[in-house]
Amino acid sequence: QVQLVESGGGSVQSGGSLRLSCAASGTTLNYYVAAWFRQAPGKEREGVSSLSVSDGRSYYTDSVKGRFTISRDNAKNVVYLQMNSLKPEDTAVYYCAVATGSIIATMYPLDAHSYDTWGQGTQVTVST
């Protein structure tokens, strides 16, 4: 079974930057859509950003627009989330996810139910 491995999390001060990476372990991953979600303590998992393979279209939740950028390196089969101008409210565990078996994620790109493969998460902490 394909496993996704996130990396790049850590602790930064407000206004700082981090780049998260998501790679498939042991195999080439074929998927329709890749996405990043986050979950803060006591809150529901939230869709942050997604990237469609077929048309390259990306989506962002309103709170990160203009600050976060999703991208992928086809040669390395890695998906990235560049996070700039980080705020304390960005503090959460960040998860990458891909939709491998269905194109429903192209219609609901920030809905967690659209994705069938998840990483274990990486902690991002932003301090004031």
Image (tube, grey):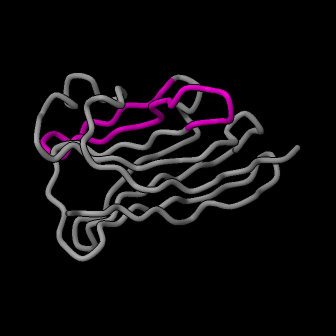
> Picture quarter containing residue 57?
top left
Who's the residue at 67% across and 55% down the image? 17
Asked if 15 appears above or below 66 in the picture, the reply is below
> Picture quarter containing residue 56?
top left
Who's the residue at 21% across and 43% down the image? 99
Q: Residue furthest right?
A: 128
Asked if 100 appears above or below 103 in the picture, the reply is below
- Quadrant containing the N terminus in the rendered view: bottom left
Magenta stretch: give its range.
39-61
Asked if 81 appears above or below 110 in the picture, the reply is below
Who's the residue at 42% across and 57% down the image? 80
Lateral position of residue 69 relative to residue 63, left or right: left
Task: Return the x and y of residue 104 as percentages of the image width and height.
Answer: 16, 28
Lateral position of residue 25 relative to residue 16, left or right: left
Task: Return the x and y of residue 5 as percentages of the image width and height.
Answer: 41, 65
Task: Return the x and y of residue 8 as percentages of the image width and height.
Answer: 57, 65
Q: Would you say residue 48 sits in the magenta stretch?
A: yes
Lateral position of residue 36 relative to residue 122, left or right: left
- Quadrant containing the C terminus in the rendered view: top right
> Picture quarter containing residue 116?
top left
Query: How many numbered marks does the figure carry?
Result: 0
Q: Would you say residue 11 sits in the magenta stretch?
A: no
Q: Could you say which is closer to the camera, residue 117 or residue 109?
A: 117
Who's the residue at 32% across and 36% down the image? 58
Lateral position of residue 13 relative to residue 92, left or right: right
